Image: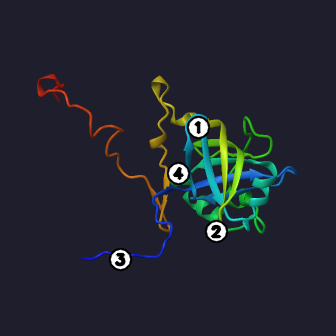
Amino acid sequence: MGRQVWKAGNMLYPLPAVMVSTADKKGNDNIITVAWTGTVCTNPAMLYISVRPERYSYHMLRESGEFVVNLTTEKLARATDWCGARSGRDKDKWKETGLTRGKAEKLLYAPVICESPVNIECRVTEVKELGSHHMFLAEVLAVQIDEAYMKEGGKFELNGTGLLAYSHGEYFSLGKRLGKFGYSVRKRRPKADRPLS
């Protein structure tokens, strides 16, 4: 089989499917589903979201300079899709989805989504007008986590939450674990040192 060459396009998949909550300074808020998001920097902790200027949430992001990235799960898949397919101009997404507003720890305007296992509170540091989407670079000010996923010893079981991914127009739950970071180069103990099963 040969290979086809297509015109330039975004084919970087899978991506996280997240719900972003934001608000303007008058108290109007909204939820927007975003897949164009990712990590930018560890220290300081930074991430980005990219949003089309015609989206209803865009003016809120610009005005308040705040947003929350709310991670999504299998249980939140329908709400995640609904918030991406409907506009806050026409619908109250909180009411229609049954999601619950929560208070952010470090932000003045943007709420968190209580049903999300992780809420990443962000303050915009720069907006890059790139073309179809504008990129909101942001510093992470706080992270809220659902204590239901805390295990003994203080370990947070993020991968036990049923996280969602988005790939080429479809949603997926994460599959089975294949290994931990560095497993391909880790030295195996000699057989004599391994515990008997």
Residue at which label 3 appears: 4
Foreground label between 1 and 3: 3
Q: Nearer the viewer, residue 122 or 156?
A: 122
Foreground label between 4 and 3: 3
Badge 2 crowding class, 10 Å Cα cut-off, few under 14, some 14 to 19, many 20 or more, is few
Q: CA distance from mark 1 to mark 2?
A: 27 Å
Give the amino acid at mark 2. Ala
Kindly state the secondary structure of the residue where label 4 is placed: loop
Of mark 4 and mark 3, the one earlier in the sequence is 3
Give the amino acid at mark 1. Asp
Residue at which label 2 appears: 85
Q: Answer whether labels 1 and 3 touch (C-beta < 8 Å).
A: no
Pinpoint residue 158: horizontal percent, then vertical percent: 49, 40
Kindly state the secondary structure of the residue where label 3 is placed: loop
Pinpoint residue 44: horizontal percent, then vertical percent: 61, 35
Tell me what residue is drawn at x 47 percent, y 67 percent.
168
Residue 81, quarter of the rendered image: bottom right
Residue at which label 1 appears: 146
Badge 4 crowding class, 10 Å Cα cut-off, few under 14, some 14 to 19, many 20 or more, is many
Residue at which label 4 appears: 73
